[in-house]
Image (cartoon, rainbow, N blue to C red):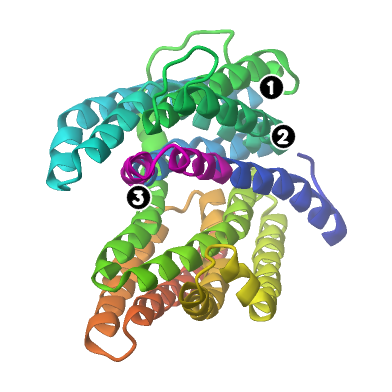
């Protein structure tokens, strides 16, 4: 990254950072899609087992990744302030912390996995697939969280194209491993859905190894000497990392689990309604990659400018990012209005499902408009290292306002299944307003303290 002097230069640098992150996020989503799709081609039971396993793992993974991504604003601010000599120490402490977090996750999973699956009362083979899918995937937890730290370091330096290339390499590796292990090719046994977990673990080790080599050998990363010296564990630094990362992780966890909760609560509706809801929600999740990528980009850029004490530039980046997200959401809204039938037809050939999915997609328009404000604003606040209020706002807007509102409208009014979407939209809208208000307060506070 480099200092910019005009709005045009800032837009250019913003998109240089953003586009690779967006491609990376889409690629990572594609890995989960291929796990599910290829398992389904094995058998319905394999599909169900992988779906259950993924539904348990993804929220945990998202939340824990959020905790470890606290290194991103720390590094970007250090680089912006010209304190390059302190970067290696911070990254190594984050890597050691990631190892401890991984071990804790594995121990907790070892104790809780069997009781949780037993409580779901699944069919025996589905239970078997879900259990061993997660057990197999567990072999890749340590490198996955290690990669999260290295990717955050790479991105914090503005080198998002490198992490994009690493992730792009991972997709064909994952698909090839799925093909071999799920279907039993090249002399391997046929593992079915369990093979998807093995393939994911294999892919995590590959991307961690590639990222490690890049950080150690390629410039500008090698110049920071991350792996040239061994550091003792610093509990003080871990405390700082957790102070920033834990609120980010919990905010991410609350965001991902709210959708799983809504899906579970909607199980009382008929199969057509549930299928239509899932189709519309899947497409809305795909669109969410845009504001999420902008969020990650703004954390890097705002952190860099704040570290350099260029507060005006940090504010300009926040305006550019949030405005871009809103403009993109308006474009996607127009797209959905014009092509909602074609989008719905991607998910089913049944007329009833297509018709109902179109109705849910209309609600998705308002859903992603709120996301376009709330998510990038969180990214800006993280760049300022202001994370605790955002975590509280997310908790209140989603779980105290959004979910109860949706439950009431879905069960006690004529809105039915649409009520849950209205509840989510309400929670997101409240969150967007409160987060914007918090951003104004933080930016004023930063100016006064400078």
Q: Is 153 placed above or below 437 here?
A: above
Q: Quadrant of the C terminus?
A: bottom right
Tell which circle, 2 or 1, labels the residue nearer the N-terminal end.
2
Tell which circle, 2 or 3, labels the residue nearer the N-terminal end.
2
Tell which circle, 1 or 3, labels the residue nearer the N-terminal end.
1
Relative placement, left or right, of 254 versus 222 is left
Write down the quadrant of residue 242 in the picture: top left
Write down the quadrant of residue 409 in the picture: bottom left
Stretch in magenta: 29-56
Image point 32% across, 66% down: which residue?
A: 262
304 within the magenta span: no
Q: Point out which mark residue 221 bears.
A: 1
Q: Secondary structure at mark 2?
A: loop
Q: Point out which mark residue 250 bears.
A: 3
Q: CA distance from mark 2 to mark 1?
A: 9 Å
Residue 262 visible in the displayed image: yes
Q: Which residue is mark 2?
A: 159
Q: Residue furthest bottom?
A: 414
From the viewer's side, name the closer residue of 150 and 46: 46
Disc 2 packing (10 Å; few <14; some 14–19; many ≥20): some
Relative placement, left or right, of 397 versus 176 is left
Q: Is 226 placed above or below 269 here?
A: above
Image point 36% across, 51% down: which residue?
A: 253
Image point 36% across, 43% down: which residue?
A: 246
Q: Secondary structure at mark 1?
A: helix
Disc 3 packing (10 Å; few <14; some 14–19; many ≥20): many
Q: Are marks 2 and 3 in contact (CB under 8 Å)?
A: no
Task: State the predominant SS element of the stretch in magenta.
Answer: helix
Q: Secondary structure at mark 3?
A: helix
Q: CA distance from mark 2 to mark 3?
A: 27 Å
Q: Are marks 2 and 1 in contact (CB under 8 Å)?
A: yes
């Amino acid at each position: 990254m480099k200092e910019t002097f005009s709005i045009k230069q800032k837009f250019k640098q913003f998109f240089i950072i953003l586009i690779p992150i967006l491609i990376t996020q889409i690629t990572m989503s594609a890995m989960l899609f291929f796990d599910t799709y290829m398992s389904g081609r094995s058998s319905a039971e394999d599909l169900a087992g992988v779906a259950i396993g993924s539904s348990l793992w993804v929220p945990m993974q998202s939340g824990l990744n959020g905790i470890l991504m606290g290194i991103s604003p720390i590094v970007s601010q250090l680089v912006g302030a010209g304190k390059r000599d302190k970067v290696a120490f911070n990254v190594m402490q984050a890597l050691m912390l990631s190892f401890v977090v991984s071990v804790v996750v594995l121990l907790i999973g070892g104790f809780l996995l069997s009781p949780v699956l037993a409580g779901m009362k699944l069919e025996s083979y589905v239970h078997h697939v879900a259990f061993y899918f997660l057990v197999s995937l567990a072999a890749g937890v340590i490198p996955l969280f290690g990669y999260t730290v290295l990717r955050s370091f790479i991105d914090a330096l503005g080198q998002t194209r490198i992490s994009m290339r690493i992730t792009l390499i991972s997709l064909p590796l994952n698909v090839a491993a799925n093909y071999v292990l799920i279907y039993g090719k090249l002399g391997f046994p046929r593992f079915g859905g369990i093979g998807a977990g093995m393939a994911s673990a294999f892919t995590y080790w590959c991307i961690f190894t590639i990222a490690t080599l890049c950080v150690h050998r390629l410039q500008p990363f090698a110049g920071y000497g991350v792996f040239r010296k061994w550091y003792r564990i610093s509990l003080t630094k871990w405390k700082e990392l957790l102070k920033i990362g834990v609120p980010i992780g919990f905010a991410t966890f609350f965001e991902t689990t709210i959708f799983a909760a809504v899906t579970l609560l909607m199980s009382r509706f008929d199969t057509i309604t549930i299928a239509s809801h899932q189709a519309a929600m899947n497409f809305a999740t795909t669109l969410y990659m845009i504001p999420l990528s902008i969020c990650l980009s703004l954390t890097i850029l705002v952190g860099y400018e704040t570290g350099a004490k260029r507060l005006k530039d940090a504010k300009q980046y926040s305006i550019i990012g949030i405005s871009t997200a809103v403009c993109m959401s308006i474009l996607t809204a127009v797209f959905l209005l014009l092509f909602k039938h074609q989008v719905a037809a991607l998910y089913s050939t049944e007329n009833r499902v297509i018709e109902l999915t179109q109705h849910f997609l209309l609600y998705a328009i308002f859903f992603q408009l709120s996301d376009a404000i709330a998510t990038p604003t969180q990214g800006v606040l993280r760049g300022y290292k202001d994370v605790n209020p955002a975590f509280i706002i997310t908790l209140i807007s989603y779980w105290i306002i959004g979910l109860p509102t949706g439950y009431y409208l879905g069960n006690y009014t004529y809105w039915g299944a649409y009520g849950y979407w209205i509840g989510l939209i309400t929670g997101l809208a409240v969150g967007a307003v409160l987060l914007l208000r918090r951003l104004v307060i933080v930016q004023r506070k930063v100016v006064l303290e400078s």
